[in-house]
Amino acid sequence: MSGIKLNLGCGQFPKEGYINIDIDRASRADFICDLARPPYPFRDGSVESIVAEHVLEHMENPFEVMKELRRIMKPGGELIIKVPHFTRAFTHPDHKRGFDVSFPYYFSPEFKGGYAQVEFELKSLRLKWFAQEDLKREILSPAVYFISLAAGKVFDFFANLCPSFCSRIWSYWVGGFEEIEFLFTKPK
């Protein structure tokens, strides 16, 4: 892909090849911006790819953020969103919400239960038991890190065979899932 790539909420983990954005001046961002206050300083249809890892759960109005992301994205552009699954969403004091496998429904005009007037196409959805590996590598002992990583791979494999069933039923049996990842595209 060529064109503008954004990494929203980069914190201390900027991505090479992206414009790294965060609200925190102590972050390693290239650009400081309050994502809760659109409009963002990008032209309509100018962004090819957006990664938003653990950002939406901090927003008062995630649908307003999604609308703004759609505005700045090129048709066919990719949007990767990683957010806490609702079973583990409130382990951080600043989280305002958790997410479920139903989140993409709100971006489909056919969803009669509450279409958000912001259209995206869902390409994939994945549950993750052991998330934010860069951060965990920094704070856990090597033994705990690698054991948790291995357990996570097993849990993730089975969870993603049927994410809807896992999200509603057996996620509680494994202590919840730390993350749910959505890959959306903006319709052409």
Image (tube, grey):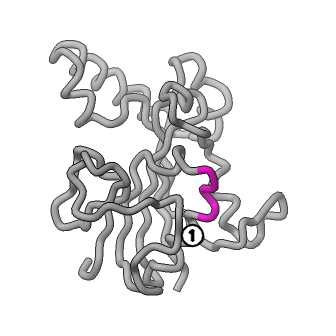
Q: Which residue is pictured at 45% across the width and 73% down the height? A: 40
The one nearer the camera, 171 or 87, is: 87
Per the picture, the main secondary structure of the magenta-coloured stretch is: helix
Outermost residue to the right: 112
Location of residue 154 in the rendering, given as x and y in whole percent from the top left corner? 38, 26
In the rendered structure, the answer to whether residue 65 lies left or right of residue 47 reads: right
Location of residue 52 in the rendering, given as x and y in whole percent from the top left corner? 41, 56
Location of residue 30 in the rendering, given as x and y in whole percent from the top left corner? 22, 63
Q: Which residue is pictured at 51% across the width and 39% down the height? A: 161
Specify whether residue 124 is painted magenta: no
Q: Counting other residues with Cα less than 10 Å from the Cα at mark 1, is it few (<14), some (14-19), or many (20 or more)? A: some
Image quadrant where residue 22 sits: bottom left
Magenta span:
60-64
Location of residue 179 in the rendering, given as x and y in whole percent from the top left corner? 46, 38
103 lies above or below 5: above
Image quadrant where residue 128 sits: top left
In the rendered structure, the answer to whether residue 93 lies left or right of residue 140 reads: right
Q: Which residue is pictured at 62% across the width and 46% down the height? A: 101
49 lies above or below 81: below
Outermost residue to the front: 25
Name the residue carrying label 1: 121
The one nearer the camera, 49 or 34, is: 34
Three-letter amino acid code at disc 1? Glu
Q: Which residue is pictured at 56% across the width and 65% down the height? A: 66
Secondary structure found at label 1:
strand
